[in-house]
Image (cartoon, rainbow, N blue to C red):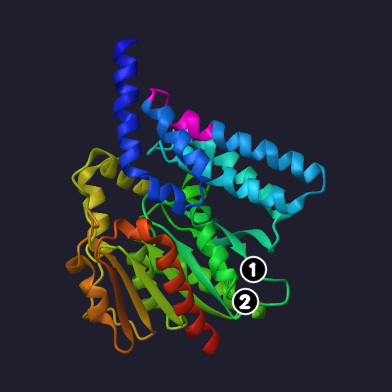
């Protein structure tokens, strides 16, 4: 029993480091739920169990509000419940039954949100080979958008984790495709698409989807953490991208010296073979000499990022052939979780100016 409690305490401490309070709030978790999650995990309850319980309470309230016709309240409760489930499933790096169950619950909550969202919100399945990339499209209105941002994360934050950013973009009349790329989310867990595929082609398929719908406007792309690498590669590969944002990414990825980082990399590739993982990262490196970025580029950097330093991001800036902007927060942490309002406002305004002009 003592060994079990020690293991839970150790795991909870790791989860609190990876899912810090600023990150919880950035992804849309309610402050009361975030403080309860920290307090109860400090008291010895498993992180995933507490996060899932808080999410289910929110979703039950959403169901009641929907039944009573209070659709706005149902939408707001569901979004908070979704954020809690995001952090519940994040406690598991590999696609074990517990993670799969939580992810299916998360997917169901997103489908329920589509019924009551105050902005059009719908599931997207984008053909890629004989499988599908999975995402969610949030539109600002039914009439049309001035542009659409393809928005995604890296090793652990995917899809609807960025729903609060999508809402900020919607307020600027931009749609957002919250995509789960190869090795991420439902695209990996249910579709079996891993990080060993043609990443550039996968995200170009998302561009196809946007351009097939004239109400979505011009496409931009915004990648967070390792996703910034994929965004930069796509912008260099696909001339249809109108604007690109890289937030806290390595140009030359590799396995970070942490057990969780190795497990997350292994899960994305579908193998625990260390050499295979490193070889795959090597083929994904961004090379500015051969990958010019012709569209406007915005690079975001946190000066206190414990994972990514400015030199890691310099190759993206070196690749720019035209407009390139670097915005830094000296005390900003990884992907600027601790200045989320300022980061999101700056980037959303930047996209709005460039996509709307186009």
For the question of whether residue 167 can be seen, the reply is yes
- Counting from the top left corner in percent of width and height, residue 65 is at 75, 43
Decide if residue 77 is on the left or right side of residue 191: right
- Provide the residue designation for mark 1: 139
Magenta: main secondary structure:
helix
User: For the point 31% across and 80% down, which residue is it?
Assistant: 325
Ranked by sequence position, the earlier of labels 1 and 2 is 1
Q: Which mark is residue 216?
A: 2
Magenta residues (range)? 43-52
- Residue 83 forms part of the magenta stretch: no
Helix, strand or loop status at disc 1: loop
Foreground: disc 1 or disc 2: 1
Q: Nearer the viewer, residue 280 or 12?
A: 12
User: For the point 41% across and 52% down, which residue is it?
Assistant: 183
Decide if residue 340 is on the left or right side of residue 62: left
User: For the point 40% across and 29% down, which residue is it?
Assistant: 41
- Residue 46 forms part of the magenta stretch: yes
Picture mark count? 2
- Counting from the top left corner in percent of width and height, residue 174 is at 58, 74
Relative to 283, does residue 91 appear above or below in the rendering? above
Around disc 2, counting alpha carbons within 10 Å, would you say few (fewer than 14), some (14 to 19), or many (20 or more)?
A: many
Label 1 and label 2: CA atoms lie apart by 8 Å
- Counting from the top left corner in percent of width and height, residue 255 is at 22, 50
Quadrant of the image occupied by residue 291: bottom left
Q: Nearer the viewer, residue 45 or 308?
A: 45
Decide if residue 147 is on the left or right side of residue 264: right
Q: Name the residue at the right extreme.
A: 68
Q: Are marks 1 and 2 in contact (CB under 8 Å)?
A: yes
**Where the N terminus falls, by quadrant?**
top left
For the question of whether residue 225 can be seen, the reply is no
């Amino acid at each position: 029993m003592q060994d079990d409690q020690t293991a839970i305490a150790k795991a909870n401490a790791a989860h609190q480091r990876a899912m810090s309070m600023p990150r919880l709030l950035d992804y849309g978790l309610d402050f009361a739920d975030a403080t309860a999650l920290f307090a109860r995990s400090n008291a010895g309850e498993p992180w995933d169990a507490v996060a899932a319980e808080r999410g289910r309470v929110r979703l039950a309230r959403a169901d009641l509000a929907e039944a009573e016709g209070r659709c706005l309240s149902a939408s707001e409760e569901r979004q908070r419940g979704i954020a809690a489930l995001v952090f519940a499933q994040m406690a598991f790096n590999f696609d074990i039954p517990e993670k799969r169950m939580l992810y299916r619950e998360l997917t169901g909550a997103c489908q329920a949100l589509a019924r009551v969202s105050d902005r059009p919100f719908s599931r997207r399945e984008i053909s890629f080979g004989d499988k599908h990339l999975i995402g969610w499209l949030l539109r600002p209105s039914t009439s049309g958008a001035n542009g659409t941002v393809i928005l995604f994360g890296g090793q652990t934050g995917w899809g609807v984790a960025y729903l609060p950013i999508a809402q900020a973009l919607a307020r600027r009349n931009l749609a957002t495709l919250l995509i789960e790329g190869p090795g991420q989310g439902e695209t990996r867990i249910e579709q079996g698409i891993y990080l060993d595929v043609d990443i550039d082609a996968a995200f170009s398929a998302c561009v196809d989807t946007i351009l097939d719908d004239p109400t979505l406007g011009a496409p931009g792309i915004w990648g967070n953490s390792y996703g910034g690498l994929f965004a930069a590669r796509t912008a260099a590969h696909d001339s249809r991208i109108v604007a690109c944002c890289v937030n806290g990414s390595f140009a030359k990825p590799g396995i970070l010296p942490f057990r969780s980082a190795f497990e997350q990399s292994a899960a994305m590739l579908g193998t625990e073979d260390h050499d295979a993982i490193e070889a795959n990262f090597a083929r994904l490196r961004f090379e500015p000499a051969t990958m010019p970025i012709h569209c406007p580029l915005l690079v975001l950097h946190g000066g206190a990022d414990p994972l990514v330093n400015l030199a890691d991001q310099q190759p993206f800036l070196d690749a720019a052939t035209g407009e390139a902007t670097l915005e830094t927060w000296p005390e900003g942490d990884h992907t600027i979780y601790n200045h989320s309002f300022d980061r999101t406002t700056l980037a959303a305004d930047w996209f709005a100016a460039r996509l709307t002009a186009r």
